[in-house]
C-alpha cells in the first residue's frame, strides 16, 4: 500500500470516528438563550425516547453567577402556559447550578415551545418570556407536532368521587369535601371543554346500604345542576358493592350510573360495557368489581366478565385505534398506583386469586392498551402514576381521587397512607388524544392547574374518521311559533329537573346540551325554519330520554 493510500485510509477512519462522535453527542443539551447575563438553562433528554417528540424525561439545569431562587415554567413564544403549576423551584447558590429531573413517560405539553426561568423569592405574577432570566428553546423535533387545538378529542379521567351520606340522610361526614370536589371536577370539565368524562369507580361511598340510593341521587343531582352537558361513563368500584350478596347493590349501580345508555344493556343488567368514541373509533372498555367490598380477598371478576373482556380485546386489538380499559382496583404489586417495593396500600386485588391471575394473563397479551385504575387515592405527587412494568405489561395509568387524595405519614418508624382530609386538594386527569400521542395531564381540580411533573405521554395510534352530528327527527308541523318553542323549552327544563337521577345517561346529557344551546335564545327573531329545527331537536331528544326513563323504571 502506498503513502497516498495509507493517508486516505487514516483520513477515512478519522472521518468515520468523527461521525460516530457526532451521532453520540446529544443534540438536546442546547443552552438557553440568556436574558440575564450569567444565567443559563440546559436540558439533557434521557431514556429510550430521548429523540421522540413530546417526551420530557431528562434533566434541566439552571446555572447562575449571582445565584437566587428560580421558577421554571413551560412556555410558548410569549409567556408561561396558562393553567400549569411551575415545573420546579430551583435555589441556586452564587456561581453554582441546580437541576430538576423529569421521570420516564412525563410529557412536554402540546403548546410548549420553551422553558423560562424567572428569578423571584415567591411565585411571580408576571411570567413572560420578556421578564425571564433565561429562556430555553425546546428543539423542534422534541415539540409535539400537534397543538392543543389539534386534539382529535379530549376527556377527563376521574376516580373515587366518594359521595357520602353527609347531608343526604345520615350523620356520617367521612368524605366531608366530596360533594364540593365533585362540583369542582365538573367545573374543570366545562372549563377544558372535554368531550366526555370517564370514572374509574367508587362514585359513592356506600357506608350504609340504607343511604345508597340517596348517595346516587346526590351524585346525579350535582351533575344535573352543573353546566356540564356532555357524556359521563363510569366503571364499578368496590364501594358500589359493600355487602354480600352484591346483587342488589350491582342493580343500584346499573340504575345509578349511565352505563352505555343502550336499552338492551339496561335490560341485561350487566355491569360491564364498551363505548366507541365517534370521531375516531377508539374503544373504551368499562369493567366492574362484582365479587364484593374487599378486592384483596374476593375473586372480583366473574368468568362471564373475563370471557367478555378476552373476546372484546381479541376482536379490537391492532385495528388502528386506541383501546382504554377502565377498571377500578389495581393488582397488588403490579404496576401503577402504589410503591411496589414498599407497598403502602393493602386493599388492592390479590394477584394470587384465580380471577386476578386470569385478568393479568389476558391484558399481558395486549401491551398497547391503556389500563386506567383508581382505588388507592394516592396523591399524584407521590409519583406512582404510570407504569408498564419495564415494558412487560400494558400501559397503566393510576387516577388519584376526586373525593380526597391520600398522602403518606410515618408513625413509629412505619410509613403508611394518611386519610386526613384536605379541603383544597382534589385530583384528576385532563386527557388530550392526538394521532400519535395521548397526554394525561395530572391536575389539581381545586386550583384547576396541571402538575408538569405528573403529566404523562403514551404513544397512540388513531385518526379522525368522522365528525359528531346531532341526530334528531324533524317534526311534521308547519305552524310552529315562538311561543311553541318557548313552551317546549319550559317543558324540557322541568323534565330535566324532575328526572335529574338520569343525568349520567347520554340521553339526559344530550337533552341538557340542546336545552343549554337555546335556553337564552330570542325565539321571536327566529325564522320559521329555525323554529322548526329547535323544536324538533328538543322534542326528539326528550323522547329518547323518556325511553330510558321508562325502561329503567321497569327494571
Image (spheres, rainbow, N blue to C red):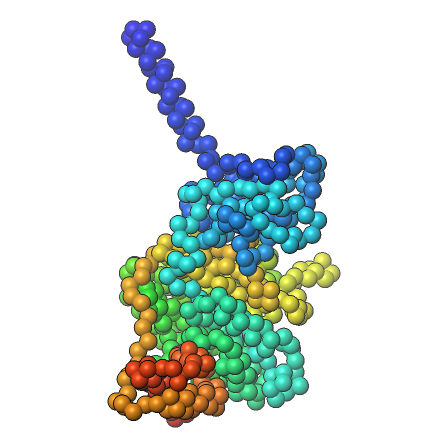
Task: Please name the residue shown 43% across and 80% down the image.
Answer: 521
Q: Residue 463, position in %: x, y? A: 32, 59
Q: In this orientation, does residue 329 appear?
A: no
Task: Please name the residue shown 39% across and 76% down the image.
Answer: 272
State whether residue 442 is above or below residue 23. Answer: below
Task: Please name the residue shown 28% across and 63% down the image.
Answer: 465
State whether residue 431 is above or below residue 190. Answer: above
Q: Residue 396, position in %: x, y? A: 46, 60
Q: Quadrant of the C terminus?
A: bottom left
Q: Residue 486, position in %: x, y? A: 41, 88
Task: Please name the residue shown 42% across and 78% down the image.
Answer: 517
Q: Is residue 462 left or right of residue 297?
A: left
Q: Quadrant of the N terminus?
A: top left
State whether residue 247 is above or below residue 57. Answer: below
Q: Residue furthest right?
A: 412
Q: Residue furthest top?
A: 3
- Number of on-image labels: 0
Q: In this orientation, does residue 276 appear?
A: yes
Q: Nearer the viewer, residue 397 or 185?
A: 185
The quarter of the picture where residue 131 lies is top right
Q: Is residue 299 left or right of residue 530?
A: right
Q: Residue 83, position in %: x, y? A: 55, 59
State whether residue 161 is above or below residue 390. Answer: below
Amino acid at each position: 500500500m502506498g503513502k497516498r493510500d495509507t493517508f486516505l485510509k487514516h483520513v477515512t477512519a478519522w472521518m468515520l470516528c468523527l461521525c460516530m462522535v457526532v451521532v453520540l453527542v446529544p443534540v438536546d443539551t442546547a443552552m438557553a438563550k440568556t436574558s440575564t447575563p450569567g444565567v443559563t438553562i440546559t436540558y439533557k433528554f434521557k431514556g429510550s425516547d430521548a429523540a421522540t417528540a413530546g417526551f420530557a424525561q431528562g434533566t434541566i439545569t439552571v446555572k447562575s453567577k449571582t445565584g437566587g431562587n428560580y421558577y421554571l415554567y413551560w412556555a410558548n413564544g410569549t409567556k408561561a402556559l396558562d393553567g400549569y403549576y411551575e415545573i420546579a423551584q430551583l435555589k441556586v447558590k452564587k456561581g453554582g447550578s441546580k437541576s430538576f429531573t423529569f421521570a420516564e413517560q412525563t410529557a412536554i405539553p402540546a403548546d410548549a415551545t420553551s422553558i423560562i426561568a424567572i428569578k423571584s423569592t415567591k411565585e411571580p405574577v408576571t411570567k413572560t418570556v420578556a421578564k425571564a432570566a433565561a429562556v430555553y428553546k425546546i428543539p423542534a423535533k422534541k415539540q409535539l407536532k400537534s397543538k392543543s387545538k389539534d386534539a382529535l378529542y379530549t376527556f377527563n379521567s376521574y376516580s373515587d368521587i366518594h359521595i357520602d351520606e353527609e347531608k343526604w340522610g345520615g350523620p356520617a361526614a367521612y368524605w366531608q369535601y366530596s360533594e364540593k370536589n365533585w362540583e369542582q371536577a365538573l367545573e374543570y370539565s366545562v372549563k377544558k371543554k372535554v368531550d366526555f368524562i370517564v370514572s374509574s369507580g367508587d362514585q359513592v361511598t356506600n357506608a350504609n346500604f340504607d343511604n345508597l340510593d340517596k348517595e346516587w341521587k346526590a351524585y346525579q343531582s350535582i351533575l344535573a345542576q352543573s353546566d356540564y352537558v356532555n357524556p359521563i361513563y363510569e366503571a364499578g368500584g368496590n364501594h358500589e358493592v359493600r355487602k354480600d350478596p352484591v346483587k342488589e347493590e350491582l342493580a343500584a349501580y346499573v340504575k345509578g350510573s349511565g352505563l352505555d345508555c343502550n336499552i338492551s344493556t339496561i335490560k341485561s343488567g350487566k355491569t360491564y360495557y364498551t363505548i366507541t368514541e365517534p370521531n375516531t373509533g377508539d374503544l373504551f372498555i368499562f369493567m366492574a368489581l362484582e365479587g364484593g367490598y374487599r378486592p384483596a380477598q374476593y375473586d372480583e371478576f366473574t368468568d362471564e366478565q373475563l370471557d367478555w373482556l378476552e373476546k372484546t380485546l381479541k376482536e379490537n386489538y391492532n385495528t388502528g385505534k386506541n383501546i382504554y380499559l377502565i377498571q377500578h382496583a389495581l393488582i397488588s404489586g403490579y404496576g401503577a398506583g402504589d410503591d411496589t417495593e414498599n407497598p403502602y396500600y393493602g386493599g388492592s386485588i390479590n394477584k394470587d386469586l384465580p380471577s386476578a391471575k386470569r385478568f393479568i394473563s389476558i391484558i399481558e397479551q395486549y401491551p398497547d392498551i391503556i389500563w386506567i385504575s383508581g382505588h388507592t387515592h394516592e396523591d399524584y405527587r407521590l409519583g406512582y402514576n404510570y407504569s408498564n412494568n419495564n415494558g412487560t405489561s400494558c400501559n397503566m395509568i393510576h387516577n388519584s381521587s376526586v373525593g380526597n387524595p391520600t398522602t403518606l405519614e410515618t408513625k413509629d418508624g412505619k410509613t403508611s397512607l394518611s386519610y386526613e382530609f384536605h379541603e383544597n386538594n382534589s385530583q384528576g386527569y385532563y386527557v388530550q388524544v392526538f394521532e400519535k400521542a395521548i397526554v394525561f395531564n395530572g391536575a389539581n381540580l381545586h386550583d384547576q392547574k396541571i402538575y408538569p411533573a405528573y403529566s404523562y405521554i403514551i404513544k397512540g395510534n388513531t385518526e379522525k374518521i368522522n365528525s359528531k352530528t346531532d341526530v334528531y327527527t324533524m317534526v311534521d308541523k308547519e305552524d310552529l311559533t315562538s311561543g311553541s318553542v318557548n313552551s317546549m323549552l319550559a317543558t324540557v327544563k322541568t323534565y330535566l329537573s324532575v328526572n335529574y337521577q338520569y343525568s349520567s345517561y347520554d340521553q339526559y346529557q344530550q337533552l341538557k346540551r340542546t336545552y343549554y344551546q337555546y335556553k337564552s335564545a330570542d325565539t321571536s327573531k327566529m325564522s320559521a325554519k329555525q323554529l322548526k329545527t329547535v323544536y324538533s331537536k328538543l322534542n326528539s331528544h326528550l323522547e329518547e330520554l323518556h325511553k330510558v326513563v321508562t325502561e329503567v323504571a321497569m327494571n
